[in-house]
């Protein structure tokens, strides 16, 4: 009830139009598909991955920073980072292990992008459980640790001379196909009501300049009382 009361209070400081947008977009968000970017070194690729995730309704993006740190280019991301939940892994000896072990514990299957005879197309990979799709670094692809955790290997079918896509383009293609599948295959892909409230509160905080003051007053009991 606390989050419901808090969002009700904050929504009084949002226009009806923005309230409608928040509710509509939250209802289209998913955590059933999540994206993991491992050691991406070009900031425009990291930023483009965020932009694509936001466009396709993927709420969580995970950045593994073993050799390369995450950097944002706002002109590329177009503000996508404001609306997503970003997870950064940069304080362990093997951040890939930390990230993927945590996702496994949360019930995710792990898919890596890699060429090979056992690789599946995004139209064929099983979606009987939530799926984390890992994109490897630009030069060398996925790490050996990521390969150890992989339940599936994904490949995007191509029909030209060029054998691979840019990592940010590949992530967009995969997200589009996988999101389309979960939305049309009877999978329970949407966020819970509590999760929707949680992210709408964060969105409201970013949209209201004085939100910290309002929340302080709410916590003290001076706002939000029926």
Image: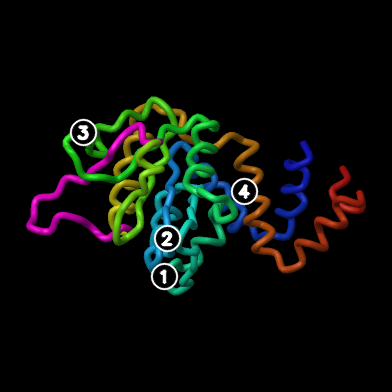
Examine the rendering and report whether any part of residue 183 can be seen.
no
Spot the residue most to the front.
Answer: 93
Mark 2 is surrounded, within 10 Å at the Cα level, by few (under 14), some (14 to 19) or many (20 or more) other residues, namely many
- Residue 149 in percent (x, y) is at 40, 36
**Numbered disc 1: secondary structure:** helix
Q: Is the magenta stretch mostly helix, strand or loop?
A: loop
Indicate which disc residue 51 carries: 2
Task: Please name the residue that numbered disc 3 is placed on.
Answer: 118
Whether pointer 1 and pointer 2 mark residues with C-beta atoms closer than 8 Å, the reply is yes
Disc 2 versus disc 3: nearer the observer:
3
The alpha-carbon separation of the residues under discs 1 and 4 comes to 23 Å
Whether pointer 4 and pointer 2 mark residues with C-beta atoms closer than 8 Å, the reply is no
- Residue 111 in percent (x, y) is at 35, 38
The alpha-carbon separation of the residues under discs 2 and 3 comes to 30 Å
Q: Residue at x 65, y 37 (%)?
A: 194
Position of 77 compared to 147: left or right? right
Disc 1 versus disc 3: nearer the observer:
3
Mark 1 is surrounded, within 10 Å at the Cα level, by few (under 14), some (14 to 19) or many (20 or more) other residues, namely some
Whichever of callouts 1 and 3 sits on the residue coming sooner in the sequence is 1
The magenta-colored residue range is 149-167
In this rendering, is residue 187 above or below 93?
Answer: above
Q: Is residue 150 one of those drawn in magenta?
A: yes
- Residue 201 in percent (x, y) is at 68, 51
Whether pointer 1 and pointer 3 mark residues with C-beta atoms closer than 8 Å, the reply is no
In this rendering, is residue 152 above or below 171?
Answer: above
Task: Please name the residue that numbered disc 4 is placed on.
Answer: 199
Disc 1 versus disc 4: nearer the observer:
1
Whichever of callouts 1 and 2 sits on the residue coming sooner in the sequence is 2
Mark 3 is surrounded, within 10 Å at the Cα level, by few (under 14), some (14 to 19) or many (20 or more) other residues, namely few
Task: Please name the residue that numbered disc 1 is placed on.
Answer: 76
The alpha-carbon separation of the residues under discs 4 and 3 comes to 38 Å
Q: Which residue is drawn at 54% across and 46% down?
A: 26
């Amino acid at each position: 009830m606390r989050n419901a009361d808090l969002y009700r209070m904050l929504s009084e400081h949002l226009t009806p139009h923005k309230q409608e947008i928040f509710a509509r977009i939250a209802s289209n968000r998913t955590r059933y598909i999540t994206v993991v970017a491992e050691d991406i070194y070009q900031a425009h690729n990291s930023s483009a991955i965020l932009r694509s995730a936001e466009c396709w309704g993927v709420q969580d993006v995970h950045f593994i920073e073993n050799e390369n740190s995450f950097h944002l280019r706002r002109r590329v991301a177009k503000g996508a980072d404001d609306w997503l939940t970003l997870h950064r892994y940069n304080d362990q000896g093997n951040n890939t292990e930390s990230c993927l072990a945590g996702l496994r514990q949360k019930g995710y299957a792990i898919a890596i992008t890699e060429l090979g005879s056992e690789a599946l197309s995004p139209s064929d990979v099983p979606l009987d459980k939530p799926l984390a799709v890992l994109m490897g670094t630009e030069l060398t692809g996925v790490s050996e640790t990521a390969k150890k955790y992989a339940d599936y290997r994904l490949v995007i079918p191509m029909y030209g001379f060029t054998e691979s896509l840019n990592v940010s383009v590949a992530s967009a293609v995969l997200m589009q196909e996988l999101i389309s599948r979960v939305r049309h295959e009877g999978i329970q892909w949407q966020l819970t009501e509590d999760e929707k409230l949680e992210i709408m509160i964060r969105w409201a905080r970013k949209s209201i300049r004085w939100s910290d003051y309002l929340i302080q007053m709410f916590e003290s009991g001076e706002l939000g009382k029926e």
